[in-house]
Image: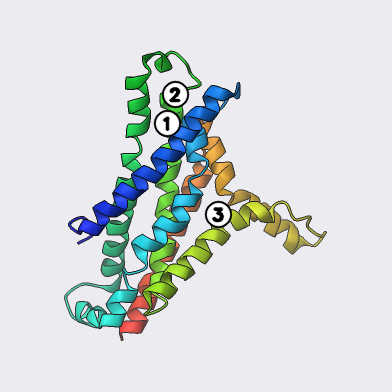
């Protein structure tokens, strides 16, 4: 239903226009400075802006709307489990998330077609940085979409689900970056909390990926977080529909 809805493609058009503007600003910034970052690095460094707004919009209706309309109980009478229902909701939203971001891959392609000399300039176009940067977007997106599905399972209101998803994502992305700047006390708990916040920093992970530093820890973090939220959502869905 997501892929045949006209509103999906209207949202995709708005997303591409917004991200296209950000990419143009990134090109201008690179051309005006002598910094070592490529446009794709500057472009992806703002990934949290579309994530905070796009993921709640994609996921807020997934289960909250089903509960409000009473169709969730009807689905549970079919020969499918709550896990299969939640997983199908997750995959639909995640594939749409990937589709939206995949559209932005045309930006560097258009840059190369318009500026052939950009291929020879590593500051303008770098295949490795594009590949690793988008790997982070797609891997981290699994956890972010799972968080949105989880928030949608907690309420019947799509608006509340969207607000919950936004708040949880803000804490997960921005909160972890702010937490490491707080001076911890000498207690073991505060030291552990600081080390965990440093481990969960999305901005640090993106920087490592953009520098072609692939580590298994971010993969484990995002994929295990996605699995945990999907599992929790399945339990909540099973309980609420019983």
Q: How far apart are marks 1 and 3 (CA)?
A: 21 Å
* Residue 132 against residue 115 in the figure, above or below: below
Residue 93, quarter of the rendered image: bottom left
Question: Mark 3 — residue?
Answer: 173
Is 206 left or right of 16, judged from the image as shown?
right
Q: Tell me the quadrant of the picture where the C terminus can be found.
A: bottom left
| Image position, residue 71 (x, y; %) | 22, 79
Horizontally, is 59 left or right of 85 in the view? right
Q: Quadrant of the N terminus?
A: bottom left
86 relative position to 174: left or right: left
Q: Position of residue 2 (x, y in %)?
A: 23, 59
Quarter of image, res 82: bottom left
Labelled pair 3, 2 in contact (Cβ < 8 Å): no
Q: Residues within 10 Å of mark 3 (few under 14, many from 20)?
A: some
Identify the element where label 2 is drawn. loop
Query: Residue 230 at what x, y percent from top left?
Result: 38, 65
> Can I make out residue 214 in this image?
no
Residue identifier under label 1: 130
Q: Which mark is residue 150?
A: none
Q: Decide: few, some or many residues near mark 2? Use Cα within 10 Å; few <14, some 14-19, many ≥20.
A: some
Location of residue 239 with respect to 32 vertically, above or below: below
Circles 1 and 3: CB distance less than 8 Å?
no
Q: Which of 82 and 4 is in front in this view?
A: 4
Figure check: 182 above or below 75: above
Q: Name the residue under label 2.
A: 126
Towards the viewer: 12 or 165? 12
Q: Residue at x 30, y 80 (%)?
A: 67
The furthest residue to the right: 186
Q: Residue furthest bottom?
A: 242
Q: Which residue is drawn at 79% across and 55% down?
A: 183
């Amino acid at each position: 239903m997501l892929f045949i809805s006209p509103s999906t493609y209207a949202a995709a058009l708005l997303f591409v226009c917004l991200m296209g503007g950000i990419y143009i600003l990134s090109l201008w910034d690179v051309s005006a400075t002598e910094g070592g970052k490529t446009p794709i690095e500057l472009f992806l460094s703002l990934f949290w802006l579309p994530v905070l707004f796009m993921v709640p919009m994609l996921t807020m209706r997934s289960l909250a709307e089903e509960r409000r309309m009473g169709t969730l109980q009807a689905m549970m009478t079919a020969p499918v489990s709550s896990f299969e229902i939640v997983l199908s909701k997750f995959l639909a939203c995640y594939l749409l998330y990937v589709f939206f971001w995949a559209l932005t891959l045309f930006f560097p392609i258009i840059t190369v077609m318009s500026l052939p000399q950009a291929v020879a300039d590593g500051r303008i176009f770098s295949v490795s940085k594009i590949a690793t940067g988008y790997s982070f977007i797609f891997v981290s997106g699994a956890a972010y979409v799972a968080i949105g599905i989880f928030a949608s399972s907690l309420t019947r209101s799509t608006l509340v689900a969207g607000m919950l998803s936004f708040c949880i994502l803000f804490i997960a992305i921005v909160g972890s970056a702010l937490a490491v700047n707080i001076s911890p006390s000498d207690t073991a708990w505060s030291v552990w909390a600081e080390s965990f916040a440093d481990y969960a920093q999305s901005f640090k992970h993106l920087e490592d990926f953009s520098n072609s530093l692939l580590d298994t820890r971010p993969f484990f973090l995002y994929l295990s977080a996605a699995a945990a939220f999907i599992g929790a959502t399945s339990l909540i869905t099973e309980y609420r529909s019983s």
